[in-house]
Image (cartoon, helix red, strand yellow):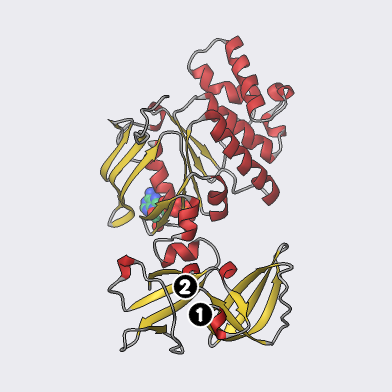
Amino acid sequence: VAKPSGAQPLPVLQLVGVRKTFGDFAAVERIDLDIVEGEFLTIVGPSGSGKTTLLRMLAGMEAPSEGNITLRGELINDVPANKRPTCLVFQSLALFPHKTVGENIEFPLKVKNIAPAKRKERALELLRMLRLPESYYGKNVMKCSGGEKQRVALARAFAYDPDVLFFDEPLSALDYKLKKVLEKELKDLHKETGKTFIYITHSLEEAMVMSDRIGVMRAGRLVQVGTPEEIYSRPADRFVSEFVGEVNVIEAVKSSAGEWVAAEGGAPIKLKLPSALTDATKVAVVVRPEFLRFVDKPGAADNAMNGTIYNEYSLGSRIQYQVRVGDKTLLVELSRGNGWKGTLDTPVLVGWDATDAIVVAA
Ligand code: ATP
């Protein structure tokens, strides 16, 4: 669809103050969110944070207790799942076990009374799209492998020709390698079809690989929505920064002289305070392991702390060191072949520059 230049893409789904309670308990707390036409949005969050409940409301399996959900401007709060132009793909796949691959894929077309020849034509097209051999058309679906069943379920979802596809952890039961392959394929399918994909998972890694935007949930709230890069580099708070991979967190407090010092030990800390925290007296300085390095003298980085290396792990192309600094363990990650030749139990200076740290509310 051609859009007027400079105009914002239309939201396909819009949530305004959407809340869901079960008795006194709020599983989802007042969420406002615009989901853009054609985007791949992933909702991540720990177990119990409300992802499934949110998805069930979007898919029409649960009505919100408060707020409005609109689809292309039309209120759909109480429209049931089968009356929405959307389709949900589950982890359990919900395939018809005694039917063939073809019958499974054609089910939505049969419901729509499409003629058998046309149905078969479309099923074969979808098999090709999902990189399954056409010879699978007549195969019993239970004789397919896990990854193949996953592809059949996806083909069936596309047969509905929905505007929006919802995915509820569809890859979580698969082994790591297959998961990686299907992540890339899903991303390709998203590009090929131009459909809106809304995906939930507790695997941030999965979210990072596939999504245009990621929404992070915690205790029923959507705490941050942004591109994978924004979520990683500019986390909204400490929870997001810690959820999004390994981090070193150094707490800093303002001294009576108005300087920032380490809460533990009292060494001065150079930091870049975001404007939102101008009045803070305590902050958390978050430094990712790849932004810490070993320095030979205190002035070689904005900040440097004395420590001792007590463990070393190979991560393949990178090496991670655990360094004891006071009562804390800091993680330092260097690329292999960085030239540093430290050994276990040696005293080291761990340094970082203020611009490489993220400062969030403590
Ligand atoms: P997981 O990753 O474990 O699936 P989730 O982030 O998807 O978790 P939800 O399944 O949405 O979380 O659950 C959020 C909270 O709401 C949980 O505390 C859950 O126990 C509660 N909850 C969900 N459905 C119901 C229900 N029908 N009745 C009562 N409480 C519910």
Callout 1 crowding tier (Cα within 10 Å): few <14, some 14–19, many ≥20:
many
The image shows residue 29 at horizontal and vertical percentages of 31, 53
Query: Mark 2 and 1 residues: CB-CB less than 8 Å, in contact?
Result: yes
Residue 50 - label: none
Instruction: List the residue tagged with mark 1.
Output: 303
**Mark 2 vs mark 1, CA separation in Å:** 7 Å
Q: In what quadrant of the picture does the C terminus appear? A: bottom left
Q: Does 335 sit left or right of 85 as displayed?
A: right
Task: Say which residue label 2 marks.
Answer: 354
Q: Is residue 147 left or right of residue 109?
A: right
Q: Position of residue 10 (x, y in %)?
A: 35, 33
Q: Report whether 344 appears left or right of 229.
A: right
Q: Please name whichever residue, 54 or 233, is drawn nearer the observer in this view of the structure.
A: 233
Q: Position of residue 234 (x, y in %)?
A: 44, 60
| Circle 1: element type | strand
Whole-percent x, y for residue 267 in the image:
45, 88
Q: Is residue 45 visible?
A: no
Residue at 54%, 24% in the rendered image: 159
What's under tag 2, amino acid-wise? Ala
